[in-house]
Image: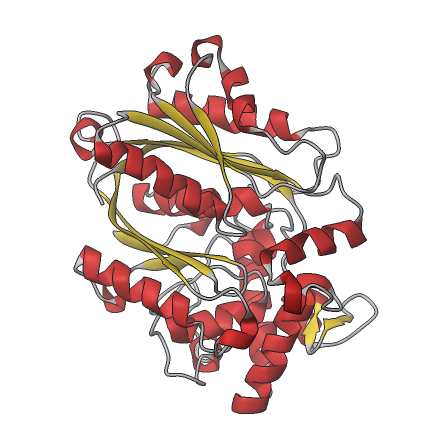
Amino acid sequence: MPGCIIGWAHTPFGKHEDRELEDLIVEAATAAIDDAGIAPADLDAIYVGNFGGFEKQSFPASFALNADQALRFKPATRIENACATGSAAIHQGLNDVASGRSRFVLVVGAEHMTVAPGATIGDILLNASYRKEEGETEGGFAGIFGQIADRYFQVHGNKSESLARIAAKNHLNGLENPFAQLRKDLGFEFCNAVSEKNPLVAGPLRRTDCSLVSDGAAAVVLTDTETALRGTKAIHFRAAAQVNDYLPISGRDIIAFEGCEQAWKKAHEEAGTRLDDLDVVETHDCFTIAELIEYEAMGLAPKGEGARAIDEGWVEKNGNLPVNPSGGLKSKGHPIGATGVSMHVMQSLQLMGEADGMQIPNAELAGIFNMGGAAVANYVSILERIR
């Protein structure tokens, strides 16, 4: 799929009690347009990724117009595809560019989750599940992934220590991410122990196995490759793949993440690459068990042996394939609509050599996996710098 990222922006993730959703959208949009070095009037289309439901305002696309008066009357559309909403919005922007309909497209992903009470947040997130069968799951979406962890442990043995190592890795990495919500090295021992500060949340999952409720926004500006090469920076999509699986968990092998596996396969075919070609990956660690299974689905480890990737250090920042040097959703936070866009910003920084303490030396090819629901909407991007 032709297309490049030529500008980006990222707000800090966390609890923004003094900000509203429109403030976050405007901040990210303004900064991304400026970073791209274009005039707001040059934009042809705007896509806003927002899961919604946390506040009564569920029609946020035109908030982006507030970034500059020149954006008034530009087409702006809200995109939603569960926790993969940000990547879905990027795909829509790429489609516009590829069709020739748009030369410059602004994509903003944003969410203001903490405006809702805690119990309400859990129920809202269950909208990314099959309500008919899974809507009463105790513990909300954590409960669903608790069931996935239980099932995985039944088949492959207890991997709680490996999950704790994933959590500890991502929190250590997040220390170097200025946008991360929780910049604290929690350490393996804390993450591995059940305690008053780290209680069991659902099934075998502890608090440290679960991503954070967050507010925040991220944005990118897209254009065609020819135009991008005339600018100062161009992060090219070697591949942008989407694969959807059945929504009900009962209709598939939930510990196989087959949609994730197929999305990676499709992306590598499109890019002409293999996993060994990648220098760094950002993957969707909404829960540590998800990252563990994703090691297997991406082909890093055989089925049932994903724990080796973390236990043997393959996915550490100095490992064979660093995974989530940004701290991932575990440390950075997980504002639903912003997550996929954030991942693309993180990898753009890597490829430009501008990731500072997060930087993986000589990163030339970067992969992204962003997931909606329990491996239902699966998006993989493979990115390279061409300017």
Q: Is residue 325 above or below residue 294?
A: above
Furthest residue toward right: 196
The spot of residue 173 in percent (x, y) is 52, 57
The spot of residue 347 in percent (x, y) is 38, 47
The spot of residue 207 in percent (x, y) is 71, 66
* Residue 354 in view of the camera: no
Q: Residue at x 27, y 59 (%)?
A: 267
Q: Residue at x 20, y 62 (%)?
A: 269
Furthest residue toward top: 69
Lateral position of residue 20 relative to residue 368, left or right: right
Between 261 and 57, the one nearer to me in the picture: 57
Q: Quadrant of residue 11?
A: top right
Between 181 and 202, the one nearer to me in the picture: 202
Q: Is residue 237 above or below residue 329?
A: above
Q: Residue at x 46, y 58 (%)?
A: 324
Q: How is the image coloured?
A: secondary structure
Which quadrant holds the N terminus?
top left
Furthest residue toward front: 132
Q: Is residue 131 above or below residue 145?
A: above
How many marks do you count on the picture?
0
Q: Is residue 100 above or below residue 266?
A: above
Which quadrant holds the C terminus?
top left
The spot of residue 370 in percent (x, y) is 45, 55
* Residue 201 in view of the camera: yes
